[in-house]
Image: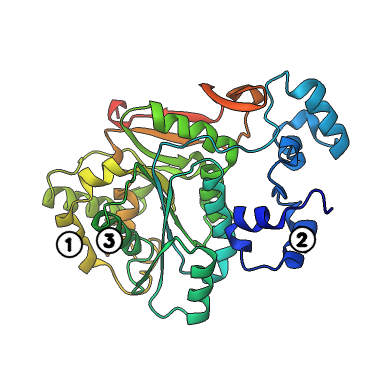
């Protein structure tokens, strides 16, 4: 174990472990880190057993030694990837997390670290309740010392904190090409088959193999709107049951002519990647000042309870990925885990010649759809 565990590397690589002593970190790796696929030393022979056997389904069940031998004699020649590698050093991404449920911080931290496995230029903005416990606040700061923490009032569910965060990054002139919007959703959506709605929304957006391909879209594709878990893309016609939402969008479009009046679909659950150019164009300061006073404190009643009142929180859930992205190329990610040939690997290293997973990613441009 002494030869395969590098304490300084382990606690530096994983920000959530930086408070640990060497023995605590060693025990964490033995009992948790190994199972989580964490890497214990910088070299590790360039081989991550869990990643290798999890990624390639034909290798499930191999022992660690068998998997290493397979990679040496076969996998490397077949262009298989033996471990995670940071691949994007140019795209500026910002993760905006509304951490209302602070007990979910370890889970959300995992998603932040997932993004950092692919991108080097990552900003993190975390909004928390203005009444957050001081100990918890300090804990977040110690684990993520470079993150920007903002205390907000409890209004507008995750929409108001998101808007506050966008204003914040604009005021600081943070370089941002794409934003990953996350929050600590605890509800389910059994009607749409999302028993674990939070993970259904997030996991496809942060899964390493998906991000490796997605970052290539970010670099090469023009006019991207939003990126969503395909499972959580819902049609506009969902609101035939909740017409107050359609009316709310209509009123906004009448009030603000720069908004696209047509829309076809939206991200149900409000967690997605979105191009910052889209927000610059549509989420204007005038629109922001109109929206903020209309958010309610606490959480408004669900749509199925109140089918009359227009709640700006539910309107924004449709607005951000509906009208904002109507004239854009939107990327949907399904639950298929991919084929080994979807990434280009030469001599064990990811290269930029070929990233394509047609069975995972689909592209939709709503404006081109005849309804």
Q: Residue at x 66, y 25 (%)?
A: 340
**Which of 336/115 is in front?**
115
Residue 290, position in %: x, y?
17, 61
Which SS class for mark 2? helix
Q: Nearer the viewer, mark 3 or mark 2?
A: 2
**Which of 209/337 is in front?**
209
Disc 3 marks which residue? 312
Disc 2 marks which residue? 26
User: Upstream in the sequence, badge 3 or badge 2?
Assistant: 2
Q: Nearer the viewer, mark 1 or mark 3?
A: 1
Which SS class for mark 1? helix
- From this view, report whether residue 275 is shown above or below residue 286: above
* C-alpha separation, residue under disc 3 versus residue under disc 2: 48 Å
Residue 269, position in %: x, y?
44, 53
> Does residue 369 appear in this view?
yes
- From this view, report whether residue 340 is shown above or below residue 190: above
Q: Residue at x 61, y 34 (%)?
A: 336
Count neighbours of disc 1 (C-alpha within 10 A) and say few if under 14, some if 14 to 19, many if 20 or more: few
Disc 1 marks which residue? 289
| Among the 4 quarters of the image, the one containing residue 285 | bottom left
């Amino acid at each position: 174990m002494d030869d395969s565990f590098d304490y300084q590397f382990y606690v530096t690589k994983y920000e959530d472990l930086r408070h640990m002593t060497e023995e605590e970190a060693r025990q964490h790796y033995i009992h948790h880190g190994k199972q989580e696929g964490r890497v214990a030393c910088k070299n590790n022979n360039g081989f991550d057993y869990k990643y290798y056997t999890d990624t390639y389904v034909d290798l499930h069940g191999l022992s660690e030694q068998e998997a290493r031998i397979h990679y040496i004699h076969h996998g490397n020649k077949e262009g298989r990837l033996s471990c995670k590698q940071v691949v994007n050093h140019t795209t500026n991404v910002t993760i905006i997390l509304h951490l209302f449920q602070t007990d979910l911080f370890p889970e959300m931290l995992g998603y932040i670290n997932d993004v950092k496995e692919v991108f080097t230029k990552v900003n993190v903005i975390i909004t928390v309740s203005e009444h957050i416990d001081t100990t918890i606040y300090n804990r977040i700061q110690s684990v993520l010392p470079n993150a920007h923490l903002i205390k907000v009032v409890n209004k507008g569910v995750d929409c108001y904190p998101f808007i506050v965060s966008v204003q914040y990054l604009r005021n600081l002139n943070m370089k941002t090409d794409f934003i990953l919007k996350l929050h600590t959703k605890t509800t389910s959506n059994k009607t749409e088959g999302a028993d674990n709605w939070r993970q259904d929304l997030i996991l496809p957006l942060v899964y390493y193999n998906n991000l490796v391909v997605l970052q290539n879209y970010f670099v090469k594709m023009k006019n991207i709107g939003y990126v969503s878990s395909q499972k959580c893309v819902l049609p506009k016609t969902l609101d035939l049951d909740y017409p107050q939402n359609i009316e709310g969008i209509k009123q906004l479009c009448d009030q603000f002519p720069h908004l696209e009046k047509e829309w076809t679909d939206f991200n149900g659950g409000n967690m997605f990647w979105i191009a910052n150019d889209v927000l610059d164009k549509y989420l204007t300061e005038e629109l922001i000042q109109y929206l903020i006073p209309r958010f309610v404190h606490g959480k408004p009643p669900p749509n199925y309870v109140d089918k009359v009142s227009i709640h700006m929180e539910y309107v924004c859930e449709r607005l951000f990925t509906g009208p904002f992205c109507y004239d854009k190329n939107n990327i949907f990610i399904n639950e298929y885990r991919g084929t080994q040939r979807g990434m280009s690997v030469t001599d064990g290293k990811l290269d930029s010649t070929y990233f394509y997973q047609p069975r995972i990613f689909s592209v939709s441009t709503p404006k081109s759809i005849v309804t």
